[in-house]
Amino acid sequence: MAGEPRFFTRNYIDMESIITSEIGAEATHPRLFDRDRELQFAGIQTTDLPQVNIIARFQSGGLDVARTVDSVVLLNHNLKNYTVEHSNDGVGYTVVATIVGDTSTDRYIAFAAVSAKYMRLATTAVQTSGQKRKIGELLVMEKLFEFGADKGPAAIAFAPVPVGTFTRTADLGIIVNQFRWAGNRVERFKARLGFTLLEKSDYDSLRALVRRGQITLQLEPVERPEEFFRGTVTPASAPSAYTSLFKGNGYNLELEFEED
C-alpha cells in the first residue's frame, strides 16, 4: 500500500470544458465538477440503454487543448459497467480502463498516462436496473506525486473553515452570515502538512508541487477515499532544512494547503 496523501493536477473537467452526453441532462452537466458530491449529474432515462456516453472536451481560452491524464475519479455514482476512453479528434476513442460489476459508491481509476483532448465515459449498465445514471463528481487528472509504502507526513493539521462574514453588534453579539462555498458546503478545507527526514527525491517532488501552486489533494486515500480537495499549496512559514540525526538524515518541509 502506498503512503498518504496523493497529489494531483487540478480537475481538467471545469467551466471551460465542453461536456456532452446522450441522456438529455445538459442542465446538470456542471454538477460533474461543482465540488459537491451530493448534488448529482443525472440522466432522464429510467431504463438501461445499450451504451450512454459522457464526453468532456478540454478547452482553454475557447481552444481545444491536450491534457496529460492518468487518473479518473467517480464520486457518489451508481454505474456498474463502463469504460474510460480518450481521443484527440473526438471520433476515434481508445479504451484505457474497463470496469465491470462495480458496486462501489466512489471509484478511483488509475491507468498509463495519455495525452488527450477528449475523455469519454461509456456506460452500459447501472448498479440497479432501471435507475437513472448518476454521478456526483467526475475528476480527470494527472497524478503528480504519491509516497511509497509506509511514508507520508509526520504531522497533519487540518480543519474545515467557515466561509462568511462576521458582524459585531452594539451589544457585543456577533451576526454570522455563511456563504455557500461549493454546492451545499459552507466551509472550505485548509491543512498544514509537516514532513521530516525526507529523501532527496521526495523532497524535490514536494518542492515541485509548490512551484505548480494549484493542485488537487487527496489527503487520506485509505481512510477517506471520497475526499478530494482542489486548491493551492505553498511552503509554510517554517523554512525547509536538511537535518542530520542519529535516526537518519533527510530534509524537513512544511506545506500549507487551502481550497480556492
Image (cartoon, rainbow, N blue to C red):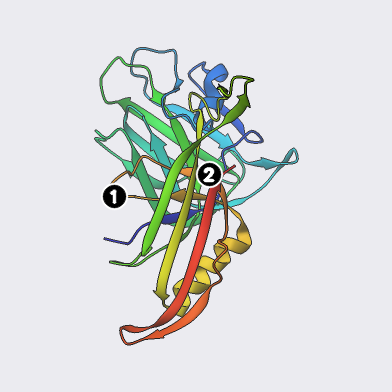
Q: Nearer the viewer, residue 82 or 150?
A: 150
> Which amino acid is tagged 2?
Arg
Q: Position of residue 66 (x, y in %)?
A: 63, 50
In this image, 18 relative to 23: left or right? right
The residue pinned by badge 1 equals: 222
> Which amino acid is tagged 1?
Val
Category of crowding for the residue at label 1, using alpha-carbon neighbours closer than 10 angstroms: few (below 14), some (14–19), many (at least 20): few
Q: Position of residue 218 (x, y in %)?
A: 42, 49
Identify the disc placed on residue 89: none
Q: Nearer the viewer, residue 163 or 110?
A: 163
Q: Quadrant of residue 237?
A: bottom right
Inter-mark Cα distance, 1 to 2: 18 Å
Q: How many marks?
A: 2
The residue pinned by badge 2 equals: 230
Category of crowding for the residue at label 2, using alpha-carbon neighbours closer than 10 angstroms: few (below 14), some (14–19), many (at least 20): many
Q: Residue furthest front?
A: 171
Q: Classify mark 1: helix, strand or loop.
A: loop
Query: At 45% across and 72% down in the image, what residue appears?
Result: 202
- Quadrant of the frame with the N terminus: bottom left
Q: Determine whether 254 is above or below 191 in the image.
A: below
Q: Are marks 1 and 2 in contact (CB under 8 Å)?
A: no
Disc with the residue nearer the chain's start (1 vs 2):
1
Q: Determine whether 258 is above or below 56 in the image.
A: below
Q: Position of residue 78 (x, y in %)?
A: 32, 27
Query: At 61% across and 28% down in the image, what residue appears?
Result: 165
- Quadrant of the frame with the C terminus: top right
Q: Position of residue 194 (x, y in %)?
A: 43, 63
Q: Nearer the viewer, residue 175 or 131?
A: 175
Query: At 66% across and 36% down in the image, what residue appears?
Result: 16
Q: Classify mark 2: helix, strand or loop.
A: strand
Q: Nearer the viewer, residue 97 or 215?
A: 215
